[in-house]
Image (cartoon, grey):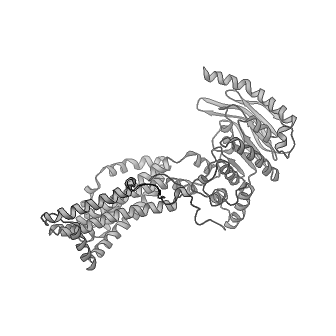
Amino acid sequence: MSKPAAPAVPAASAPRERAPGVPLRSRPAVYRIASVIVGLAVWEIVGPHIDPIFFTYPSAIARAAWEMTASGELPKYAWESLQILFYGMLLAIGVGIPVGVIMARFRKVDWVLDTWLNALYSTPTVALVPLLVLWFGIRAEAKVVVVFLFAIFPVLINTYQGVRKVDASFLEVARSFRSSEWQMWRDVLLPWAVPYITAGIRLAIGRGLVGMIIAEFYTAMTGLGYMIVRYAHIFKMDRTFVPVILLMFLGIALTAALKWVERRIAPWNRTED
Amino acid sequence: MADRIALKRVGKRYGALQVCRNIDLTVGEREIVTIVGPSGCGKTTLLRCIDGLIPYEDGDILVEGERITEPRAGVAMVFQHFGLFPWKTVYDNVAYGLRIRGEPAERIAAAVPEYVNMVGLSGFERHYPYQLSGGMQQRCGLARALAVEPKVLLMDEPFAAVDAQTREILQFELLRIWEQRPTTMIFVTHSIEEAVLMGDRVVILKGRPSGVHEVVDVGIPHPRSRATLAERRFAEVREHVWSALMDEARKAEYELGR
């Protein structure tokens, strides 16, 4: 046996146990589910009484979703959006993490870059979108750049903060064993910063989704954002809501996936979520 | 016996604060020297200087005749805080020094189980540090240091953070391991008993700034065991070190109280 593949995970990080003795009225899940059911029911009952030009209701949205999926329209636009999001996030993570570590490790780089980054971070990124569209055209590249700009700061800043807070005793051990700077990244800094980085990526996903939709509003040719604009303009509320709800589920799913990944790659980290 | 470590008039300052000065000390190739002294006397600081982790202002620290300016190959340190990486398993923690050194994979695969076994952690290779007791964690820290086959072992109050029973067990474990593979060892502790039990010589650091007050030859032959604790010579040396340290400790206590 050379390198153990999977750690023997103890009870501490096992999936949440269900306490058998807890009565229904004390279980949080009961309240959450009931709240959603009641909310949807009220919406379903009240919705049809409002002018369909402005509003809709769950069953109409579900019907529209089915039609749009069957026609292939929704998968096509969703796929376009997902690609933009994927490349934008990949770029944000791929640039944000190394730049964050470098800034945290080399003070002079930090001093050179921090004013620029603070200025850019303080600028509402939305304000740059028309400019970016002008520079990069209305094709996919522009949208990827917008997603990247929306998403990079939380990744970069969290990585920076995490690396700065690294426990000095680990650095001492690494130095004592004559670790090189690069080995220190691999063995100490990045593993240490994993919880910070994943928290940054979690924020970045939310911001990246915003960037994706705004870019699609502006360029109005592809993606879920385009779909929203197009159906809103012709007052098809049920169809407008479909991509909106899909985006909601996308945000939830990506965040959950990230938590799962985090538990897999950082089983030692037993902090609360 | 040749000296593997030599300290010549070593002094360390933190800004205006002189921690220690004029430290002269030699350690032989197969010798354990323990350093005792009151808290804040700079024992750990001195050890960090010898490891090359922090700079020193005056004098020379020589290991195998070469002046120490940065951590040196062949010198390994065991830390009071264990310093195990929480994201690495026992196996990977023990393999750490070998990987840093770029040892080939087969060498690592052969060496790690040997040292894991030596410190009594077989079967725990896949555990993470947080799944181990303090004593087991320090066993892992010891295995990590031993795995690089150091010529010099620096022990920084290695058993200060574990409970009393575990501490005793680990002391005898360490003696047993050392007797299998004797190396140069400097062992810093604030326990007089531990200093006398582990050391061939006991260095008493005293004063502010501290200096070598006395070097006591323990004169109890190896192998040492629990029976050593009952020897008359052990009690004598312990009392001697105790009285050398205690006036100082009493003074220090009152100084703090003022």
Residue extending furthest bottom? A71
The quarter holding residue B46 reads: top right
Q: Position of residue B199 (x, y in %)?
A: 79, 40
* Residue B68, placed above or below residue B237: below
Q: Report the residue at 65% width, 43% height from top.
A: B80
In this view, the residue farthest toward the top is: B258
Q: How many numbered marks appear?
A: 0
Q: Where, by quadrant of the figure, is residue A253 drawn? A: bottom left
Q: Is residue A47 left or right of residue B149?
A: left
**In this picture, is B101 found above or below B59?**
below
Residue drawn at x 46%, y 55% as measured from the top left = A21
Identify which residue is drawn at 63% across, 65% down: A3
Work out whether B257 lies above or below B95.
Answer: above
Q: Note whether residue A142 is visible.
A: no
Looking at the image, which is closer to me, B4 or A37? A37
Q: Is residue A86 left or right of residue B150?
A: left
Whether residue B233 appears in this view of the structure is yes
Q: Position of residue A127 (x, y in %)?
A: 25, 55
Locate the C terminus of chain B and report the quarter of the image it occupies. top right
- Position in image of residue B165 (x %, y %): 72, 43
Query: Residue B62 at x, y = what percent?
Result: 74, 43
Q: Quadrant of the N terminus of chain B?
A: top right
Which quarter of the figure has residue A258? Answer: bottom left
